[in-house]
Image (cartoon, helix red, strand yellow):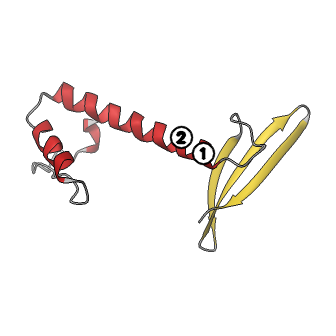
């Protein structure tokens, strides 16, 4: 995780202003912890974000599209589409959904 931080930048980052005050305070106190703890929290946050995205996608999956379907998103002309593709027997099935 620390590879993403520039070696030349020595200023401590600040939590995003859009976060609620209690969460900003919790993140501020995190800066006082050991590097291993910060890395563990960063790993957890990344895993939590991936889980939340997967859960969101599952909730918006159209009827009849199986969980094992491959999902990709594409933007065309300013409109985003989610494309589902899966195999059913010898056939390849697909469905495209326009996102809001």
Q: Residues within 10 Å of mark 2 (few under 14, many from 20)?
A: few
Q: In this view, which residue lies farthest toward the bottom?
A: 77
Quadrant hosting residue 49:
top left
Quadrant hosting residue 36:
top left
Q: Residue at x 33, y 32 (%)?
A: 43
Residue 64 drawn at (x, y percent): 78, 43
Relative to residue 98, is residue 88 depicted above or below? above
* Left or right of 79, for residue 34: left
- The answer to which of 15 and 22 lies nearer the viewer is 22
- Residue, disc 2: 55
* Left or right of 79, for residue 7: left
Label placed on residue 6: none
Q: Residue at x 28, y 38 (%)?
A: 3
Q: Could you give the CA–CA distance between mark 2 and mark 1, rounded to whole angstroms?
A: 6 Å
Q: Quadrant of the N terminus?
A: top left
Q: Residue at x 13, y 46 (%)?
A: 25
For mark 2, give the secondary structure. Answer: helix
- Do the CB atoms of the residues marked 2 and 1 lie less than 8 Å apart? yes
Label placed on residue 59: 1
Residue 99 drawn at (x, y percent): 62, 62
- The answer to which of 3 and 40 lies nearer the viewer is 40
Q: Residue at x 68, y 35 (%)?
A: 67
Relative to residue 83, is residue 36 depicted above or below? above
Residue 58 drawn at (x, y percent): 61, 42
Q: Residues within 10 Å of mark 1 (few under 14, many from 20)?
A: few
Residue 32 drawn at (x, y percent): 7, 35
Give the total of numbered labels. Answer: 2
């Amino acid at each position: 995780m620390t590879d993403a931080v520039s070696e030349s930048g020595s200023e401590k980052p600040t939590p995003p202003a859009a976060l609620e005050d209690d969460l900003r305070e919790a993140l501020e106190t995190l800066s006082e912890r050991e590097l291993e703890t910060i890395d563990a929290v960063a790993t957890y946050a990344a895993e939590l974000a991936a889980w939340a995205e997967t859960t969101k996608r599952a909730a918006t999956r159209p009827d009849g599209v199986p969980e094992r379907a491959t999902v990709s998103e594409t933007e065309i002309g300013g409109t985003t589409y989610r494309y589902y593709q899966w195999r059913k027997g010898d056939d390849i099935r697909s469905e495209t959904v326009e996102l809001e």
